[in-house]
Image (cartoon, grey):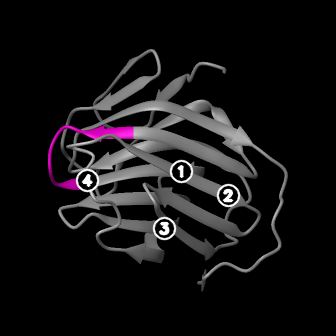
Amino acid sequence: AVPVQWLPVSGDWEFSGDIAVEHSDRAEPGNRPRVALAGNSTLTNGTVIVTVSARDGVGDIYLIGRWHNADNYYALRYSDPHAKLALLKIVDGREYVLAEQEKAVPQSPRNEPLRMELIMDGDRLTGVAGTTRLEALASNFNSGASGVGVRYRQGEFRNFHAVAQEKVSEESPVTVV
């Protein structure tokens, strides 16, 4: 595996080996997450995977795909205190919820590390956290960088990797937005 070369976009990040930690427990102006991109992770189709632990009990954790800039990307967001998982598209700075589920995982990443996956296969997006799987269609971005983020939360990300693949599916997902 190629080591991750982290590129902090915003926030108070520290990097050590494959570990990325954001300490600030804040958001960026406009209530945006604090983001770090993996410099060698631009994907058209593929899967982005990370294991995250939270250092506090409330806030948002992001796994990001097809990033163009702070106003345009896809994300899988996990939020406490309601254990809500959401598959998002951010277009021109506006957030659209493509699919979501409350009480998505039994344990907060504050208590137990959470493995998150964002799968991008053509227009099909799939987000996985624990045993919860969300699916949607979105055709805004064909490729882009991958990374992680936090908003009003301190997060520790480990074992980040992005795996490229050819477009494989033709099936329709559960939700079309």
Q: Name the residue under label 2.
A: 120
Q: Name the residue under label 1.
A: 117
Mark number, residue 107:
4
**CA separation in Å, label 1 and label 4:** 17 Å
Q: What element carries label 1?
A: strand
- Amino acid residing under circle 4: Gln
- Residue 99 in percent (x, y) is at 48, 76
- Nearer to us of marks 3 and 1 is 1
Q: Name the residue under label 3.
A: 88
- Residue 96 left/right relative to 84: right
Mark 3 and mark 1 lie on one chain; the one further toward the N terminus is: 3
Magenta span contains residue 77: no
- Amino acid residing under circle 1: Glu
- Nearer to us of marks 1 and 4 is 4
Q: Residues within 10 Å of mark 2 (few under 14, many from 20)?
A: many
- Amino acid residing under circle 3: Leu
**CA separation in Å, label 3 and label 4:** 22 Å
